[in-house]
Structure formats: C-alpha cells, structure tokens
Image (spheres, grey):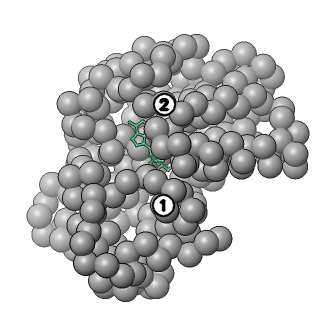
Amino acid sequence: MTRDDIYRTGDDVEPFRFDERVARVFPDMLRRSIPGYAASIEAIGSLAARYVRAGTNCYDLGCSLGAATLAMRHGVDQPACRIVAVDASPAMIQRCKEAVAEDDRSHGPETQVDIVNADIRDIEFINASMVVLNYTLQFLDLPDRDEMIGRIFKGLNDGGLLILSEKVVDENAAMEELLVALHHEHKRRNNYSALEIARKRAALENVLVPETVAAHRARLESAGFSHTAVWLRYFNFVSIIAIR
Ligand code: GEK
C-alpha cells in the first residue's frame, strides 16, 4: 500500500481533488483517515448477501478504487445481477478497472461489473436492489443531495436497500468540538502529523460539506424510505441503512 504523504509538505493548500496523486495513495489515506471505513466495507458485503435479488442491478456511487464494488460482488449470492460502479475521477476509474480485472482473474467474473466514468448525478437507476453511497454524498453541492436521494429511491425496487456513509457534524457545538478532537487524535495515532491534519482539513473546507445525522434521516424519510437506521458511528463518521 503506497503511503499517503500528500500533505506532509507545502504551505499553499489547494482545494482537495480526486486526482492521480490521491488515487495512488487512496487505500492508505482511507484506512488512516476514516474511522470505521473497514467496518463499512465488511457490512456492504453482508448486506449484499441479504438484499441483492436475482436479476437486479446494484450501484456503487463514487466507487473510487472499487472496494465497496468488490465487497458487494463477493457478497451477492444470486444469479444474473449487475453492479454499476460510477466515479467522476478518471484516475480512480483507471485503478478501479485494474482492481476489478484482478478480481476477475482471482475469483472469476461471477457478477458482471460495469465501470462508468461519470458524474453520479447523471446516472439513471433502474431495477435496483442495492445502492451504495459510501462517503460520496458529502461531496455533492447541498442543493443536489435531495434530488440524488429522490432519484435513488425511485430506482430501487420495493424492499431495496441504500447504504449511506458520511462524515457528519454534531448539532451540539461542544460535542462537535470533542468529536473533531478525537478524530484528529485518531489520525495522530495513525501517524499523520499535526500539520498534515491541519492542511488536509483546509483542503477539504467547502469541498466536503457534512450535515447532521438528523438532516440525513429527514432527507431519506422525505424521499419515501420506510425504514432508516444508523448502524455504525465512530466519532463523526456514520453509516446509515435505508430500506424502500
Ligand atoms: C469506498 N466509496 O472506497 N460523481 C461521481 N463521483 C464523485 C462525485 C460525483 N459528483 N463526487 C465525488 N465523487 C469509496 C470511497 S471517496 C470518499 C469514496 C473520500 C467521487 C470521488 O471521485 C471519489 O472517488 C469518491 O467520490 C469519494 O468505499 O475520499 O472521503
């Protein structure tokens, strides 16, 4: 795994972008930065086994290098399913294709995976039994999020599942301060320096815009989801499941 040293040096912090430099170190970046990331991937595999129906489509939106796509693929135990993995970053898509090709060689291509370089706002959802937004909705402009969730809801079959993982902000300012401090401490333990943490935070300002858990659940419910639950929370990172 190539080590994430992107913010080790340099004073001029540009807004964060999912370019080749990020794609190259991405697995290490996620592992050291997102508390609960590995648990989210593991649960996606278990949920695929439970919710993916024969002859339906699954979507991994903001698939990056395909970690959630492959977890779904390994979890699915129904025939004639298709996974559509979408990402807007060409650098991510290139590496995702390599990871899926490697998986074809080692596991065999049991479930078809279509890898699409596109904006998730332009994807049509049809006959879906499972949709994954693993730490991706947070990068959309706020006004686009309602429409995105509404379109996913419409494309899901009855009983279909959405998994939505996000960085969140707490309503209570004192609690938010504590959760951010705990997250930064976690990153320090994972060998990011205080300066690296500060630079990354500045780069993500206005790029990753977190909302409260209540705002996410309200949006899911107003889109029509009949059941929603937070199944994972680790500091200010949560994962929510929603069933149509
Ligand atoms: C994982 N889900 O490993 N359209 C398409 N892709 C987008 C858009 C958009 N509008 N906005 C952002 N992305 C992955 C991790 S990373 C999370 C997801 C993170 C893509 C972006 O290019 C990047 O690959 C991904 O969403 C977010 O489970 O870096 O915190």
**C-alpha distance separating marks 1 and 2:** 18 Å
Disc 1: CA contacts within 10 A as few (<14), some (14-19) or many (>=20): some
Report the amino acid beneath label 1. Answer: Val
Residue 183 position (above or below residue 158): below
The residue at 63%/21% (across/down) is 57
Q: Which residue is mark 2?
A: 118
Numbered badge on residue 236 = none
- What secondary structure is found at the residue carrying circle 2? loop
Q: Is residue 211 left or right of residue 189?
A: left
Please give the name of the residue rendered at 34% of the width and 20% of the height, measured from the top-left corner. Answer: 150
Taking the spot 50% from the left edge, 38% from the top edge, the residue there is 87
Is residue 157 at least partly visible in the picture? no
Residue 234 seen in this snapshot: yes
Q: Can you say which quadrant of the picture contains the N terminus?
A: bottom right
Q: Total of numbered circles in the picture?
A: 2
Q: Position of residue 228 (x, y in %)?
A: 39, 35
Badge 1 marks a residue whose secondary structure is: helix
Residue sitting at x 54%, y 49%: 91
Ligand 1 within 8 Å of the CB at mark 1: yes
Mark 2: give few (<14), some (14-19) or many (20+) Cα within 10 Å: some
Assess mark 2: CB under 8 A from ligand 1? yes
Which percent across, then down, holds residue 29? Answer: 49, 67
Q: Is residue 180 left or right of residue 133?
A: left
Front residue (pair 20, 187) = 20
Of residues 157 and 228, the one drawn nearer to the viewer in this rendering: 157
- The answer to whether the residues at label 1 and label 2 have Cβ atoms under 8 Å apart is no
Where in the figure is residue 184, as x and y percent of width and height? Answer: 32, 77
Position of 168 compared to 163: left or right? left
Work out whether mark 1 precedes mark 2 in sequence or the reverse, and give the earlier one. 1
> Which mark, by number, is residue 22?
1
Looking at numbered disc 2 in the image, what kind of residue is underneath it?
Ala
Q: Position of residue 146 (x, y in %)?
A: 27, 27
